[in-house]
Image (tube, grey):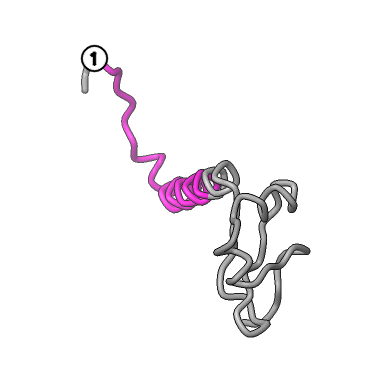
């Protein structure tokens, strides 16, 4: 994959020098880290990464819910006390 999925790019050397400055200059947007002009990694703020993981987890559970939806007519409601 050679498509750069960010308007901000930096070399590995720039990343080594000052990663915090790269995030600051990008305004919190992802920074594509290039090696020989090819993206090898993306630098994202911690908050963005955490949001991405949460979205992936939400999507996973939605797939589980949708897969189990046909089983709902067979389900039996119980109270928390019964558990």
Identify the magenta region.
53-80
Q: Position of residue 47 (x, y in %)?
A: 57, 41
Based on the picture, tell me whether residue 67 belongs to the magenta stretch.
yes
* For residue 62, above or below residue 14: above
The majority secondary structure of the magenta stretch comes to helix
- How far across and how far down the image is residue 15, in percent? 59, 63
- From the top left corner, tell me how far across and down residue 72 is, in percent: 41, 40
Quadrant including the C terminus: top left
Horizontal and vertical percent position of residue 11: 64, 72
Q: Is residue 8 left or right of residue 42?
A: right
Residue at x 55% of width, y 46% of height: 55
The answer to which of 54 and 68 lies nearer the viewer is 54
Residue corresponding to mark 1: 81
Snapshot quadrant of residue 82 = top left
Residue appearing at x 63%, y 75% in the figure: 34
Find the residue positioned furthest to the right: 7
Residue 37 in the figure: left or right of residue 69: right
Which type of secondary structure does the marked residue at label 1 adopt? helix
Q: Is residue 40 left or right of residue 78?
A: right
Between 36 and 52, the residue placed more toward the observer is 36
Q: Residue at x 68, y 82 (%)?
A: 37
Residue found at the far top of this picture? 81
Which quadrant, please, contains the N terminus?
A: bottom right
**How many discs appear?**
1
Q: Is residue 17 above or below residue 58?
A: below
């Amino acid at each position: 994959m050679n498509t750069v999925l960010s308007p901000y790019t930096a070399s590995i050397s720039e990343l080594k020098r000052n990663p915090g400055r790269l995030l600051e200059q990008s305004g919190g947007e992802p920074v594509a880290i290039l090696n020989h002009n090819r993206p090898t990694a993306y630098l994202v703020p911690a908050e963005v990464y955490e949001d991405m993981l949460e979205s992936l987890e939400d999507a996973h559970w939605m797939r589980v819910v949708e897969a189990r939806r046909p089983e709902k007519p067979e389900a039996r409601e119980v109270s928390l006390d019964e558990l």
